[in-house]
Amino acid sequence: MRPECKIPAATLQAELDAGGTYASIARRHGFGAQAIRFRCVGLGLQPSRAKRGAPPSEAVLRIALGVADVSLPRLAARFECSVSALKVAARRYGLPTSPDGRAALREARR
């Protein structure tokens, strides 16, 4: 039998607000996605869908995507837009969102 998920509600809510999924939270804490979902449902927590604003301008997005170790969900949370809106804007501006493309973007700035 697997250990019961006892991650504090504040930790789960912070990760959900930052755009984390049940699967990403599960990987980070060593549980299965269903255990995280069960814990969140039991605590009344849901992935945040309330923050939906416009993505940033091309110049700001170019700089943000070039920052190492910052995930797309975290950038989206910072800009108060969805990850999909961020990806659509990046595609419209011709900016990469893949890890390799973002690494190339960083190298091009040097």
Image (spheres, grey):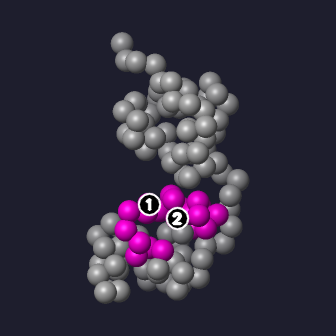
Report how far apart the C-alphas of labels 1 and 2 lie in the structure: 6 Å
Q: What element carries label 2?
A: helix
User: In the picture, residue 45 is in which quadrant?
Assistant: top right
Asked if 87 appears above or below 48 in the picture, the reply is below
Residue at 29% across, 81% down = 107
Task: Kindly identify the amino acid type of the residue bearing the numbered disc 1.
Answer: Ser
Tag 2: Cα neighbours inside 10 Å, few (<14), some, or many (≥20)?
A: many
**Quadrant the C terminus occupies:** bottom left
Measured as percent of width and height from the top left, residue 104 is found at 29, 78
* Residue assigned mark 2: 75
Residue 71, numbered label: 1
Residues at circles 1 and 2 in contact by the CB criterion of under 8 Å: yes
Asked if 15 appears above or below 98 in the picture, the reply is above
Tag 1: Cα neighbours inside 10 Å, few (<14), some, or many (≥20)?
A: some
Foreground: 76 or 85? 76
User: In the picture, residue 109 is in which quadrant?
Assistant: bottom left
User: In the picture, residue 105 is in which quadrant?
Assistant: bottom left
Q: Give the range drawn in magenta.
A: 64-85
Q: Can residue 92 be seen in this view?
A: no
Horizontally, is 25 left or right of 84 in the view?
left
